[in-house]
Structures are given as C-alpha cells and as structure tokens.
Amino acid sequence: MAEHAIISVRGVDKVFNSGSDRAVTALQDIDLTIGRGEFISLLGPSGCGKSTLLRVMADLTGPTSGTVTVNGKTPGAARADRDYGMVFQQAGLFEWRNVLRNVELPLQVAGVKKEVHRAKALEMLELVRLSDFAGHYPWQLSGGMQQRVAIARALSADPEILFMDEPLGALDEMNRERLQGELLRIWGDTRTTVVFVTHSISEAVFLSSRVVVMSARPGRVAACIDVDLPHPRTAETRTTPEFFEKVKEVRQALHGAPSEQAAA
Amino acid sequence: MTATNISASPRPPAAREEQADPATLRGRGRGGALARRLVDPLGALLVVVVLAGLWEGYKALGRAVDDRILGIGLPVATDDLSMPHLWTIFGSLTAPARAGDPTSLAVYLIGETTVTLREALYGLTAGSLLGLALAVLFLHLAPVSRGLMPWLVASQTVPLVAIAPMIVIWGGKAGLQPWVAVTGIAAYLAFFPVTINSLRGLKSPPKVQLEFMRSVGAGRARVLWSLRFPAALPYVFAGLRLAATASVVGAIVGELSAGTGRGIGRAILTSAYYYSNGPEKLYAAVLVAAIAGILFVQVLSLLERFALRNRHAR
Amino acid sequence: MSTVPLSRPGRPALMSRALRLTPVAVTAVLLLGLWQSVVVLFDVPVFIMPSPVMIAEAFQQDFGTIMSASRSTVESVLLGLVLGSLGGVAVALVVSRFPRMSGPVLNTAVLVNCAPIVALAPIFNNWFGVTSMLSKAGVAAVMVFFPVFVNTTRGLLQIAPLHVEIMESLAARPRQVALLLRLPNALPFIFNALKLGTTLAVIGVIVSEYFGGSTEALGVYIAYQAALPRFDYAWAGILVSGALGLAMFGVVTLLERFLMPWHESLHEEES
C-alpha cells in the first residue's frame, strides 16, 4: 500500500491553547496512511479530534508537531495546488451566486478560463444530478440539494482528494441514505480519494473501504477496520448479515475505546 | 419594498451577535472585554484628534498656498471667516454671548439646548408610545398591517421635514405654544423607527416558544406580556436609538420653522444670520448641538445597557 | 439558510402579486375617499387640511413653478446622494483594510451620526456659497455618508466564518476574497444604507433650503406658500416632495433587485 499512499500522517499532535492552563490536547501521536482511491471514514465520538485531523490534512490548521504529506507535498502546497476539494457540514453556498456559479467558484479562483469552467461546472451538476437547477439560487434548494451542490463545487476542479467534514450531518435520515448512495456512485465515477468524517457507525460502514475509529481525550486512532463489502452497495446492502456484522465490529471497537467511559 | 429595510442600518444586538466577524469572536475572552472598553474611548479620542488635525492642517495648508494648489482653488476657503481656528471657536464659548450681557456663550447655548432637548424628549416619548401601540396593533391585525404598512413606509420616504411649516401653522391656529408644535414634529419623526423595530421584535420569538406558550394555555395578552414584549426589548431599543436622533433633528427643524421661540435651532439660525460678525459663534452653536444630540442618544444607550444587562455578554 | 423548506415556488405568479397589492390599493382609495369626504362633510377649513381635489387643482395651477423648484432640489439631492455614497463606500473600503482600527472608527461614526447633521447647513452655506448647489448637496452628502460608511464596513467585515474557510480551502488570494466574497457580502448592507440615504438626502437638502439660498427650491416653495398662507399650494409642494422621495426609494429598490436577484428570498420571507 505504501507506494500508493496519497496521504500520510506521521506522529501528529495538535494542542490548542498550548502553553496556557487551558491547553487541550486534541490529537496525540496520530499515524495514518491513506491509499490512492480509498474511501476512508474517520469515526468517533464528539471531541475525538476527527474534524481537527481532517483540517490538519487540509491545511486549515497546522499540527503542533509531526509531519503530514498530501499528494507528495506539504498540506500547504497541496492546498495551493488545489489537490483537494472540501465539503463542510453546512453547504456554505454563496447566496449571491446561483447554483452553476457556485460550482464554478473553485475554477474561477484557480484562474481557469471562463469557457472551460462553464462546461466543467455543467458536467459536475450532471454528476450530482442537479442540471435542472443550474439557474436556481441556494435559498430555492432543500438542504440535501444544497449539500449536493457543495459536493459538485468541491469536485469541480478535479481534485485528487475529497475531504468531507460530516457533510450529511445536518440532513434527515431519508435524505442521508439517498445521498450516501449518490456519494458512492460519484466516488465510483471519479475514483477520487475520499476522507470522510462522521459520527454515524452505519454511515461509515456503508460508505467506506476502511473505517478509522478514533477515541477522545486525547484524540487517538483506536482501530482501523477494513470494510470489504462488495460494490455496488445498495439499499439491500444495509440489510445483509455481513453489513450488520461489520457494524457490530466497528461498534465494539468504538466502545472498547476508553474514551467512551470517560465521555459518559 | 419591505418595511424593515428602512430601519436596518443599526441592527439590534441580538441580530448583530449572529454573524460577528471571526476576528472579534476570537477576542471575546474576559481580558478582551476590558481591553475593548479601553480601546473604544481611546479610538474615539484618536479619531477626534485626527479630525482636528485635518481641520487645522487644511487651514494651514490653505493659508500657505493662498487657497490655490496648481492653479486650482481649494473647495473651501481657509481664511478666518470661513474656517476659524479651533481655539477661536472654543474661546468664544467663554466670551459673553452678546455685548452688554454677562452671560457667556456656553451658558447661553446650553440653555437653548436644554429647551431643544426637552422638546425632543417629549416628542420621543409621545412618538415611541405611539410607535409601540401601532406595532402591537399591526401584530394582531394582519390585514390592517398589510394595507397600511406600505403607506407607512412611503410616508417615511417623504421628507417629513417638509411638513414642518404646516405643523407649526396648525399649532399656531390652534392657539398652542410654539414648542408644542415642535414637539409634535419631533414625535412624528420618532414614531416610525420604533414601530418598525418593535414589530420586528414582537414577531421575533421562534415558533417553539410560541407553541410552548400555547401548550400551557396562555392567552393572547399573556403571550404578549410574557413572551413577545421581553423578546422585543432589544429591537425596541434599537428603534429608540434611531428615534432619539430623529427627534433631535425634528426639534431643530421644527424650531427653524417655528419663527419665534427658543432652542438651539433658533440659536444656530441667529448666529448664521450674524455670521460675519463672529463666525466662531456659529461653529460653537453647531458643536454644542452636535454634542447635545450625541449625549441624548448616549443616555438612552445607558438605559438600554441597564435594561438588557442580563441578555448577552456584550 | 439552514431551515429552507424542501421546495419553494420560483417567481410568484402574477396573480398572487396582484392579490398582494390589493390591500395596498384599497387602503389608498379608502384613505383618499375618507379624506375628501371628511373635508367636504365637516367643512374643514383649508388651513387644517385642504381636500385632495383642492390640492390637485393647486398643483395644476402652479405646475410650472413647482416643477422648476423641484428640479433644482432634485439635482442637489442626487448630487448629495452620489457624493455621500461614493465617499461612504470609499472610506469603508479603506477602513475595512484595517480590521483592528475599524471597531473604534465605526463606533465613532455611529456616535457622530447621532448628532443633528442638518445643523451643518449654515456652515456649508458660508463655505460653498448660499446660492451654490454644493452647499445643499454637501449637507445631504454628509447625512448619506454615515449610514453608507457604517453599513458598508460592517458588510465587508461580517463574513460567515464558513465562507472564509471555503475560500481558504480554495487557496484564494486576498484580492479574490475581497472581490468574490467581501464585496457581494456587503451589497445588501450597502443597499439598506442607500435606501435610508435617499430619505436622508431629501431631508438634508430641504432643510438646507430653509437656511437660505435660491428661492427656486422645493423647501423654500413649501415654506413660502405656507406662510402666505396658501395651504393647498403648500400641500401640493409637500406631496411632490413626497413623490420625489418615493421615486428615489423606488429606483434604489429596482437597482437592488437588478443587482441582487438572489435577494428575492428576503422579499418573500417578509411579506
């Protein structure tokens, strides 16, 4: 796997308010290697630092110590080269831009020619099946549709990596499951590497090729569990014994984590 | 054309808190509060000093180049008649207001200002009560509000000061003292921001709270008193702050139209009339009026801070 | 934004828009009718309230004078509005470059804005000349400046942290953040201030006209007719000034709809 690694995290610590009496260790000694084309979930209770880890990889915050390599470069260089796209818990669409122009934003920032980015954005809307809504403004869309636009936006510059920070957390169960299916289809179509933060066990199992279970206070990797459920995964997949078995395994790993008692 | 647009410039604190910029959010610690309390007056002082420097600097520059730069005349002449030195202006405050009268200009102006502020205060009180009453009415009578509101908004895009001469004449015909008419103008200018902001505030409680009140069997009056009024308070104060400024403007404009009577508006008009005899007196009068207007609103802000002391950590 | 219902209708149909305007029109007709009949029935003296018909007649008779008076007033108002809003936006752009300083500067501006700025009128008359348009427009400009400056600065600085992070994740340059995020974010703030500004500009100019200058001005016309006393004529002038304020407000609103089509959301919610 090592030669295919696209992200590697070595001995990363992250301490907030370091040096003061309110210092909080969010991440401690994290080692993680993510292979090209993987769908990785970072799973854990709130406060386990899974979002912080993602933000360290995305260079939205720096590690206190340790090294991170993204696509063979520092995270900062990867960000500058637009090697990754990012989806947040809230869609965060610019309300003054219509759907199409929201999707175009990364291309525009990257300085891509207008003719090119118009076509590319339309292609992305096709991918998330929102072509009919290109001219709509964000307020005219439901939460699920907004999140699909955010995914299209993140993918529009053809990034090699997609960082997703609880992107489906604000949706209801129905929408969530539908979007999970969409996400797998998009992943299959684009072969992008996905790093996906979630606190839902079933979501992590359904989506991922590997689940990274984290424990809290301080945030650590408690277990890495490969999920070898066959593709394409559909609604039926959720009812198979293999799926339940995996969910159980992940749940045990999560509960085995000392954080659970501490957090309770 | 929505009504709220008119009042939106100073947002109620509740709304302002929602999307503060990250820089201020970060500085929201305990130590930050104290630092900010010091920074504000210091910053204001700095701004005042800069403005004073600009005034004297511009004047000095104009004097040095004889009001012409590269052959182009400066927009404002800098001779002592157009721009008296700041110290001349402040000096005039201690000088007698009139020849043969021992009262200093400062005392005279402050006396006139209290007349104006009293008119403004009465107007503000009357206007706010009217504004609140209208808000409650609009809240409960949706059809009335839908029909009347756009016209109320329209009435505010009308320069109300244009009606000032009429109101003064009405007052005169009705045999009222001039100050009553002036108060009326102040009230007329003051009521609108209170109506708009109060209405928005009365509508501000989220559905959950309204449904909770209904679930405990609270009637309309109880909902109004126990939920809507307290929820509206920050909005009402935001409206009152706007109204306070408007009422001072209304009082001054009213005095201009009133012909006779007292007040700082009159004093400004008089000193403008005798400008060439002492330009600094006009500046002094305008300065006093400005400071009085600011203090008037600040008193209200203090009241607001006291009334809302338990709401947000500000 | 997080609680948008599943699907919203697009543009409201013409029918529903017409329905919404009905109460407004009905109120207008009712008010006018009430006004006319009260004046006629109770024989209200002219100095209290002339009837709408009388005002209309006065307007017709003095049409030429009122129009030429309005013209100079409108010109001053527009000049003041343009100067004030350009100045406000320009200073806001500078101040927002220094977020640290912007707090105190904003607070001071809010404070100064509590002062009755119309009191500057006689000073400006002396600076720019009583008959100069600039002396009237100047007062309007100062009155417009403050809300535009304060609002624009707030709009440029109050950005959703999430939006900042998105731009950061896209490795956007500061210039791009300013152009693609801060400026559009400030637009609604600017328009709110402009709407306030149109009213303020008209007030500023009319009050300055009371302080002297050319007699060919709407403010002077109103005061003069009221003093004569020819109240129906004064009221005709007042109504024209009202229409003027309303028209400018309308133009700004149209401009807003044109420049910010996404803001229909707000219009919908508040109706």
Image (spheres, rainbow, N blue to C red):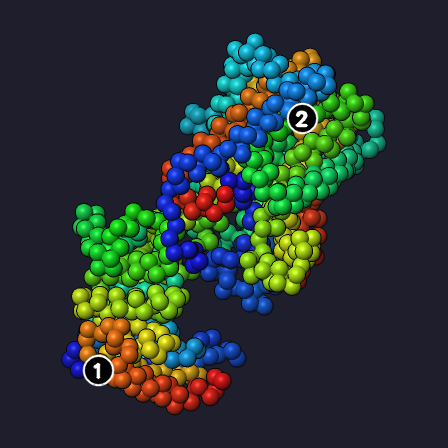
Residue under the point 15% across and 80% down: A3
What residue would you read off at disc 1?
A228
| Res B164 label | 2
Q: Is residue B299 above or below residue A44?
A: above
Q: Are marks 1 and 2 in contact (CB under 8 Å)?
A: no
Query: Could you tell me residue B73's position as x and y percent?
Result: 47, 25
Residue under the point 77% across and 30% down: B180
User: Which of the chains bears the disc numbered 2?
Assistant: B
Which residue type does callout 2 highlight?
A: Ala
Query: Could you tell me residue A73's position as x and y percent?
Result: 23, 71
Which residue type does callout 1 highlight?
A: Asp
Image quadrant occupied by the N terminus of chain C: bottom left
Q: In this rendering, would B209 be left or right of C100?
A: right
Tell me if mark 2 has few (under 14), some (14-19) or many (20+) residues whose alpha carbon lies within 10 angstroms of its own: many
Residue under the point 51% across and 60% down: B24
| Along the line of sight, the residue nearer the viewer: B250 or B141 | B141
Q: In this view, does C124 lie above or below A190?
A: above
Extreme-left residue of the structure: A3
Query: Could you tell me residue C123's position as x and y percent?
Result: 61, 28
Tell me if mark 1 has few (under 14), some (14-19) or many (20+) residues whose alpha carbon lies within 10 angstroms of its own: few
Q: Is residue A49 above or below residue C124?
A: below
Q: In this rendering, would A238 be left or right of B70?
A: left
In three-dimensional space, the C-alpha distance between marks 1 and 2, rounded to whole angstroms, equals: 82 Å
* Discs 1 and 2 share one subunit: no
Extreme-top residue of the structure: C61
| Along the line of sight, the residue nearer the viewer: B48 or C22 | C22
Q: In this view, does B146 lie above or below A38?
A: above
Is residue A211 in view from this perspective?
yes
Query: Could you tell me residue B197's position as x and y percent?
Result: 60, 46
Q: Quadrant of residue B231?
A: bottom right
